[in-house]
Amino acid sequence: MTVRTTLVAATAVALSLALAGPAFAAAPAGGDHEATREAIEAAVKDGVPGVTATARTGHGVWSTTAGVGNLKTGQPRSVHDRYRVGSITKTFVSTVLLQLEAEGRLSLDDKVAKWLPGTVRGNGHDGRRVTLRQLLNHTSGIFDYTADDDFVRTYFLKDGFFEHRYDTKAPADLVALAMTHKPDFAPGTSWNYSNTNYVLAGMVIEKVTGRPYGDEVRRRIVKPLSLNATSVPGTRVTVPGPSSRAYSKLAETATGPTYDVTKLNPSLAFSAGEMISDSSDLNRFYSALLRGKLLPPKQLKEMKATVPVEVIPNAGYGLGLIDRKLSCGVHVWGHGGGIHGSNSEAVTTADGRHSLALNFNGDWSGDTDAVIEAEFCGKEN
């Protein structure tokens, strides 16, 4: 199981009816990625409409696609596709907060209430007891607003989604919704993935800098690394081209009709999961991050200090960064992300030399973990 944005109500299970599509692979720049290609094609046979993936190794760049980017036209996916990356946004947000700490503008041990007084309050929540670090590693206990039943019905199930897909949600409203529930646990006593944590993190960035968090992401990360396919859309409902369509069942099961959910207002995710990117940009970002090009050694060490995560075997959660030990003993660092019709993963080795980023344009099927295992534990790459 991977940690995703949880902005989809559907449970990921295999479909018996495969949506087979044309496969394409760029010529490998060196090495053998056949196991990775097979895992990607297996995802399409499992029901994912289409997959795009890019790997960077010491041999160069290798890209492949399988399946389709448009179920109506049969147009294949492109290795240059831009897509909604969901919770991969969290690593960008954490990086900005850690940069601000390095600049002496805040401390990760600051209480949330120092920057957002009165925002985390109600039903047992208390921002005077929660630190910024606990937001970033999900040990705050703050309720996840995307787990609210009404929110799920309104934005993730068919009838609600098509009525409300273009709604604009203010981050303060997302947090206020979470405050109508009790905390999951006392701060620092356990772990639970909560998108509310990263909505608050984005709000803290805005309070400290006086600018939209997206502007800080662009200024500090996107522009310096020339991530030309990466954007923070705000309330823009479209995905810039080149891109494929995104598909969902918009149901609590993986059966039934498939709906095109490409257009939506991503403010419902804000700094927890609204960003758009492509596979090449994500590889460049995570490689630069792990190589220390974005953070001083002290902050990168803090980011890589993990807490155990029971829902992901052999994994720990740092500050917006997951450390995963694969079956062959290789450690990869990165994050996954899910949002309507889009399921993504981006991981890299600790030295930043071997990276993989991929996207499924369906949110109800397929095994991203199998693709990661194949790339790093399959045949020699």
Image: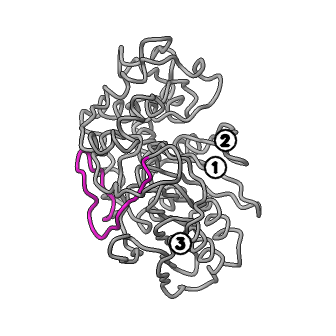
Task: Give the CA distance from mark 2 to mark 1.
Answer: 7 Å
Residue type at numbered disc 2:
Val
Q: Nearer the viewer, residue 6 or 107?
A: 6
- Where 304 falls versus 358 (above or below)? above
The answer to whether 110 is drawn above or below residue 354 in the figure is above
- Residue contact at pointers 2 and 1, CB within 8 angstroms: yes
Asked which secondary structure carries label 1, the reply is loop
| Colour mapping used in the image | one colour
Tell which circle, 3 or 1, labels the residue nearer the N-terminal end: 1
Depth order, front residue of 71/304 = 71
Q: Is 35 situated above or below 189?
A: below
Q: Residue at x 40, y 42 (%)?
A: 156
From the viewer's perspective, is 268 left or right of 19? left
Give the mark nearer the N terminus: 2 vs 3: 3
Pointer 3 and pointer 1: residues touching (CB < 8 Å)?
A: no
Using the image, determine if residue 185 lies above or below residue 223.
Answer: above
Report the magenta residues as a range. 228-250
Q: Residue sitting at 32 percent across and 67 percent down?
A: 243
Please state if 316 lies on the left or on the right of 153 as rendered: right
Secondary element under disc 3, as helix, strand or loop, is strand
* Residue lying farthest to the right in this orientation: 328
Whole-Å distance between the Cαs marked 3 and 1?
A: 22 Å
Residue tagged by mark 2? 311
Q: Which quadrant holds residue 157?
A: top left
Q: Residues within 10 Å of mark 3 (few under 14, many from 20)?
A: many
Q: Nearer the viewer, mark 3 or mark 1?
A: 1
Q: Which residue is mark 3?
A: 55
> The C terminus lies in which quarter of the figure?
bottom right
| Residue 265: % across, % down | 27, 45
Q: Could you say which is closer to the camera, residue 47 or residue 55? A: 47
